[in-house]
């Protein structure tokens, strides 16, 4: 199974909520809060909804809300993919 990567997450976030052109998402952003990156809780929920549809995994709202950084969100998605045995 292929892991859901930071690059995958950036693409989903940009697609779901856009990107603030003043922010650089190319640096080490794994530990940076989504709010500091310009993404609010609605953007995260939209991204989670798209991933649920595209990857076929369940991402509970409360767990998505607790994933405050890209690292936490990636862990959530990859854990759910592993549980489901879903290959990307």
Image (cartoon, rainbow, N blue to C red):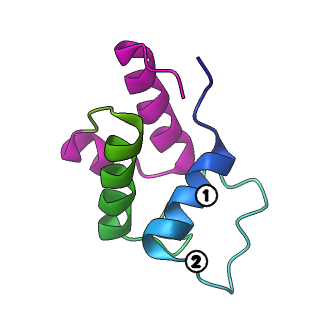
As helix, strand or loop, the secondary structure at mark 1 comes to: helix
Q: Position of residue 9 (x, y in %)?
A: 56, 50
Per the image, is 61 magenta?
yes
- Residue 40: where, in percent of width, then height? 37, 71
Find numbered disc 2 in the image and state the secondary structure of the residue it sits on: loop
Q: Is 68 situated above or below 3?
A: below
Outermost residue to the right:
27
Q: Tell me if residue 75 is in the magenta stretch.
A: yes
**Left or right, residue 46 beside residue 7:** left
Image mark for residue 10: 1
For image coordinates 33% across by 33% down, the residue present is 56
Q: Between 22 and 45, which is closer to the camera in this rendering?
A: 45
Quadrant of the image occupied by residue 20: bottom right
Going from N to C along the chain, the mark reached first, 2 or 1, is: 1
Image side of residue 12 versus residue 47, left or right: right
Q: Which mark is residue 19?
A: 2
Q: Which residues are magenta?
A: 60-88
The residue closer to the viewer here, 31 or 9, is 9
| Residue at (32, 42) in percent of width and height | 52
Q: Is residue 5 left or right of residue 68?
A: right
Inter-mark Cα distance, 2 to 1: 9 Å
């Amino acid at each position: 199974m292929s892991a859901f990567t930071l690059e995958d997450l950036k693409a989903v976030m940009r697609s779901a909520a856009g990107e603030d052109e003043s922010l650089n998402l190319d640096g080490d952003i794994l530990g940076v809060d989504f709010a500091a990156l310009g993404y609010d809780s609605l953007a995260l929920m939209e991204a989670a909804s798209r991933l649920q549809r595209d990857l076929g995994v369940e991402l509970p709202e409360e767990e998505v809300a607790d994933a405050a950084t890209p690292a936490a969100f990636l862990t959530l998605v990859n854990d759910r993919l592993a549980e489901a045995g879903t290959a990307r």
